[in-house]
Image: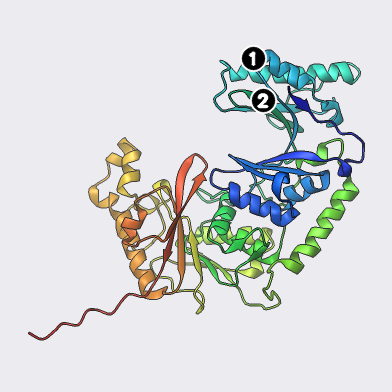
Amino acid sequence: MGHHWRLRDSHTSMTLLTLFLPCAGGVEGFLADEVHGLSGLVGQDLLTVRGGVRVRGDWALMQRLNLHSRLAQRVLIELAHAPYRDEQDLYALAAGAAWEDWFAPQQTFRVDLTAQASPLKSLNFATLRVKDAVADRFRAHAGGVRPSIDTHAPQVRVVAHLDATHATLYIDTSGEPLFKRGWRQDKGDAPLKETLAAAMLAASGWWLPAERRVADTPLYDPCCGSGTIVIEAAQLRLGLPAGGQRRFGFERLRPFDAAQWNAIKKEASHADQASAGGALDLKDDAIHVFGSDVAHRMVDFAQRNAERAGVAHAVQLRGGDALQRMPPTAQPGVLLMNPPYGERIAAAGVAGQKGHGREAFQSGTLAHQRGADGAARTAAEVNAGDEFFTRLAAHWKSHYAGWTAWLLTPDLKLPGRLRLKESRRVPLWNGPIECRLFRFDLSARGPAPQRSDP
């Protein structure tokens, strides 16, 4: 037997909602920590499931999670859940949900359907049946008026998920996906999603989401591109909310209360900055977050992004080759980077002078995966990536003793290319690409062995 949720009264903050926060694979535990830090919820009110976190909370918490979460892709409100066998069951489930409580027939909507092991032959037809049910529900309960579909820029998003036996219907409260923080205009050739940058910060231990604080150690990204990792880190250090510069889907939903939302935003701007560093004294003017990139054009992008994100005063961005740049601080800290691979291999100027710029540092594995284009390269070009990583490790051993390096890569052989032994490996997904976040504890290069006299 399925179940539906209705808003029992107009005062939504009193109504307990079931929320689902989807996230990238491997991030579920960090997201649960983040939600706990933001809400204090535990136990049955905060459940980690595959692909996300289920939360029981009110409308105000939903707004706070949208505003603050750096790891969730969206915040969805669950409206119906039931077993199904065919498309007619989906129609009945959707027709039983009180959509008229959530939006008006004058608003446009779209339906996004995802499925895992669903027995249905056509997911397009299943999506159509859900759309029909929503429209028919309005016709029956909203004076014969039905809302229009807009697949490109809908005012409201309905989400349906099917597994092998059960269907779940949600209404989306985020609008644009949450990785769109609102500050990015300048993108690199392959910008890292902000949600993944935040996951790297959590996995490295520099950001402690359950405690809502960051470590009192410097953070440096020597291949910073358009600045995603650096900007996420600086916003965390300053206590700025992730979504402080954007709008959200819930602002278009019927229960929206502008006064309540403004109070939540005001509270965020005060409370976060008071607690941002936990035990840190953020009154000092010292910069703790650093980035550099061999491409000066990318450093300009990163600087403009940092200005729009409100963190330009809290980061230091420089041009320079990862193989030559010295540590930005005397105090050892955390190196966190997404080193170039495939089309992005442009991390070093010096190692690439004889190569083809961004193309020069393909590892053999990744070049091979690219087929004819990669196969056309000479062995020397393909091995340029290996040379870059070998030289990077040597540079780190010479100059970064005491630092901890974390590298995100799809190349499982990267430790061998660096000739370093990893101390940890964390599985993370970069979109559809399975990656590992490798940890390397950097120690000084040992003295050369003494030659004994014959």
Q: Position of residue 155 (x, y in %)?
A: 77, 33
| Residue 439, quarter of picture | bottom left
**Could you say which is closer to the camera, residue 403 or residue 119?**
119
Q: Is residue 323 left or right of residue 79?
A: left
- Residue 15 horizontal side relative to residue 244, left or right: right
Whether 245 is drawn above or below 217: the answer is: above
- Residue 86, percent across and down? 64, 14
Where is mark 1, residue-wise? Answer: 86
Name the residue rendered at 24%, 79% in the picture. Answer: 448
Check disc 2 and report its element: helix, strand or loop.
Answer: strand
**Image quarter of residue 241:** bottom right
- Residue occupying the point 72% across, 32% down: 170
Give the spatial CA distance, label 1 vs label 2: 10 Å
Residue type highlighted by circle 2 = Ala
180 lies left or right of 156: left
Q: Amino acid at mark 1?
A: Asp
> Which residue lies under the disc numbered 2?
167
Q: Quadrant of the C terminus?
A: bottom left
Residue under the image location 51 percent in, 45 percent down = 430
**Can residue 395 be seen in the rendering of this structure?**
yes
Task: State whether residue 353 appears in this view.
Answer: no
Asked whether 12 or 143 is in front, the reply is 12
Q: N-terminal of the two: label 1 or label 2? A: 1
Q: Is residue 441 above or below residue 425?
A: below
- Residue 415 location, x and y as percent? 35, 57
